[in-house]
Structure formats: structure tokens, C-alpha cells
Amino acid sequence: MIKQNKGLKKRLFVLMIAAILLFSACGGNSADNKDKDADPKATAEVGKEVGKSGDGMFGMHANLSDTFNPYTSKAVENRLVCQLIFDNVYDLDENYKLSSRIVTEAVPTKGGASWTFKIDNTIMMHDGEPLSAKDVAYSISLASGSARYGGRFLNYGGAFAAGDDTVIVALTKPNNMFPYLLNVPIIKYGSYKEARPAGSGAYKFAEDGASLDAFASYKEAEKLPFDKVYLREYPNIESQITAFEDSEIDIVTNDRTSKNNLGYGGNNEIRSLTTTNLHFFGFNMKSKFVQDPSYRYAMQLAVDREHAAKVAMNGNAVAAPLPVLPKSPFFHQQLAKSVGYNMEKCQQVFHNLEVRDHDNDGKLEYLITGIPIEIDINLIVCVESAGKGDIAKKFAEDMREMGITVTVKELSWNDYIQALTDGEFDMYYGEIIIPADFNLTKMLEAESPLNYGLFDDAELIGFIDEYLAAGDDTRADKCYNMLNALIQKSPIIPICFERREVIMHRNVFSGVNPSLGNVFLGITEWKMH
């Protein structure tokens, strides 16, 4: 293991702040259990009784002392309520399909370095004014500078309104996947400082301040499943769970991988959605053994991702040999299979690289100028959320049985961050929210504060840029080239994407298809029973 030199200290403060904002190594946002891949409507048939909340009313937990502004609210429960109040520019569903009720036309120019969006001005906002390009451009700019959304806008130059119905966005690099980044909420122009800004979503604030009313000017408002949403505040987790069980509130989200996992009862209907929270192994490029890309590639074959997702994460993740969502059209099955869990192949690859038991001590060594060197990999992991320690230990055990020592160090969040910043690791277990365009530049670019392992490869960044700049006709090929380069260079080893739970009362609603960023996507298709 090699410590980083003192010249790195100047970037440590920036690195630690970036870790808190974007690199959630101990947090998460996902969940599911073993049977939740089933259609929730089919699952509901198991219990024939109708949930108590089938009373025509809909209740939600809210923090009434916090804002209901999606760009300033700190309350998770309020951000869920906001999804009823504010439209996103675009929505991305569970099958990675993009849609928008806001944008009628999107045209890239300058090879994808500029975008022109036509806005539907027939959409009304809750203040009685039509939605304008000014509102949309303003909201995109807010999102680009926010802690919650800003990490995805890597090459954002600016947005402005050109008339009432046209938004023009300038980028510093071409990105023909840019609309996939725009599942961001739209608020009224100039309302950033307001606690309850006007939106254009299906529900608006009622005069009582403690409920929402169906928005009469919403398109297909007659199809909305309930007329009123009651906002109810509960002082602690226990009272919130009790309120849900008593049907005072009708929907909650839950992250079963975090230390804040909530224990709701079993007689509920649980739908799962896949997040872009990627779990992975990263490497310290100053460490002698793992700085070799051939050795890193071989270790890809020693990661049992299915065990990680289904057992260690208790079904609350999706195995991911590639840093691309498996339901995306850009996920390449053959490339994924090429780095699938295979200890026999792993050992053979190491053998071909002269990583063998050269001194007959039962352990493998690698050669430096013909001299056998013992291998002892220091793997650090933060264990303040479910599954990560078990995944790291399973990897270490498989490597040990092959003859390579991997020492797992389970650390608290603070100690983990300190070890990362000091370079006190050979490998680390990481977690990061990647953008929906699968741009890994923020992790891999040489000067990025999230590049903990000090990886530096301009060629790989070039492959990423070519993929993002590709048009519809060449994107699949360019994505293949990018993913193949990621495998060959192996700066990280992808493990899985987290999942999150949306919990409702059994047999009360059908037609519910939540997505990341919009649990209420397609709400006019909901049916209350």
C-alpha cells in the first residue's frame, strides 16, 4: 500500500466536501426484497381484503415548518409532496424511456453542444399564468447550481428563454443525451426564495396551507385519482409508521439499504424502482499491485454481483457488471458476460499474467523484475449501511481461496473519508449517484475531487466524450467502445445499482408506475378502489 504524498493535501478539503454532496459511500436510496420484481397488481391478488385507506382521501406525511420548494426543502417527505406540485422538464421511467408533457420538440445543434426546446404554452401554472420558456430556463439554471441536482450538469453553459415558447441551452461539450438529465422540477420564474412557489403539476396548495387540491386546469384533471391530498405532520419515525398503519397517510418511500430503513408491516403493496446509485470497487493508482490494469481486469471476474444484489443487499439492488442500468438500451449483454463472476477464469487470467505461487507457500505472487512479491490488498469499506461489509468480505474470501490476500477494513463514515483522503487504501468500496446519461467523467477525470484513486487516462475520457456526442445512429456503437474501454482499463469494478421502495396499502390503488424523480408519473392512470 502506498500513501499519497503531501502535495495532495490542498485538494483534501474540496474532496471531503464533494464526498458529502455527491459521493454517498454510506448512504443510499433504494430498496426491494426478493419477490418485488413481480407486477404489484399481481402481488396484490394474494391478499383479497381491501386496505382501510380506500376512503376517497389521500394523506401524506409532511414537514409543515419546512418549505415546499424542491430547490430549498431539506425534508425528504416534502420533496415527495413536491412531486405532486411540480412538473419535471422530462421524466425517465423504470424502463429508461424518456417522456415530457412540457417539451413538444427538442433539437440539438452544434453536434449536441446546444439544445433548443419548444415548450407547451397551453400548460397552466397554479397562479393562473401559462407556463413560459422563462420558467423552464430559470428552473434548469437553478437545478444546475443546486446541491441535489447540480452534480449531473457537468458541461452546462447556461439556459435562456428565446420568446415565450423556446428555451436554448448551451453546453461546454457536446451531449446528445442531455434531455436525460432534465428530470428536474419547474417552478415559477423568480420564485427561488419562496417557501411555496407556483408549479404546474397535478395538485396545488390549498388555502388552508395544510392540504393540496386537484388542479382544475391540469390536462385530464378529470382523471386524477383524488380531489384532495391531506398533509399531516408526525414528530418521529414511530408515529409516522403508526400513521401509515392506521391509514392516516397512504404512501411512503423507503431505503432498506440505509441506517434509516423504516420497518413497515407486511400487509402492504410494495413497488420498487431502480436508482442510479452505483456501488463499485475503486483503486488507488499509487498502489503497486492494483495500478496494473491487467490485474484490475482479472479482479472483475472475482466479484459475485448476483450474490451482492440478492443476498448481501437482500434484493434491494440490481446486479451491474457495467456502469449502465441493465434496462437501458445501451446495456451490452456480451460485455456484461465477459466480466461475469467466474473464479476459474479469474485464476487463469492471473496465471497468464505470471501471478502464480512462485515460492510454493500456497499464496500467489506477482513479479517485479523477476522477483516474486507477496500480494496483500487493503480494502476499506464504510459499514454504516446494509450489505457493503458482506459484499467486501465475500470478495475477500473468494480472492483468499485463490491465493490472494485481501484485508477488509470496516470503518465508520468519518474514518472512511479520512482513509480516502489520506490514501490509506489499495481498494475502496464506493457508492455514487451517476447521471442518467452514464457519464463517469466526474469520477475519472484527473482533476476531479471525486477521483479518489488518482486515475488518469485521457483516452478513456475521450471514449466517454465520443459516446455523449454521438447521434442516434452511432450511439450504441460509441457506448460499446466506452464500456469496452472501461473493462480493459478497469478504473472501477461496478457491482450493483440500488433500489428504493414505494409502499402503499394493499389493493387500494392500481396503475401505479413510480419512477426515479417522479413517484407519481402517470398519475392520471391511477385507479382508487
Image (spheres, rainbow, N blue to C red):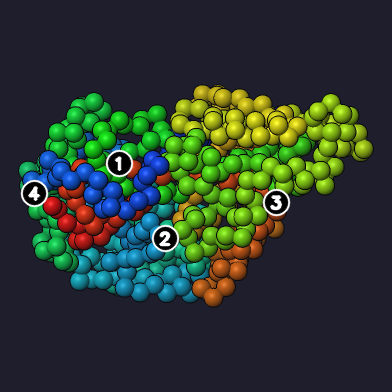
What is the distance, in whole Å, between disc 2 and disc 3 at their CAs? Answer: 27 Å
Q: Is residue 196 visible?
A: no
Residue indicated by mark 3:
489
Residue nearest the viewer, comparing 471 with 67: 471
Residue 460, relative to residue 357: is it above or below? below
What is the distance, in whole Å, between disc 4 and disc 2 at their CAs? Answer: 32 Å
Q: Earlier in the sequence, mark 3 or mark 4?
A: 4
Q: Amino acid at mark 3?
A: Lys
What is the distance, in whole Å, between disc 3 and disc 4 at their CAs? Answer: 56 Å
In this figure, what is the number of numbered marks? 4
Q: Element type at marker 3? A: helix
Residue indicated by mark 4:
56
Q: Earlier in the sequence, mark 1 or mark 2?
A: 2
In the image, 285: left or right of 526?
A: right
- Residue 304 image point, x, y percent: 59, 41
Q: Quadrant for the N terminus, please.
A: top right
Residue 4, relative to residue 277: is it above or below? above
Residue shown at 41% from the left, 44% from the top:
499
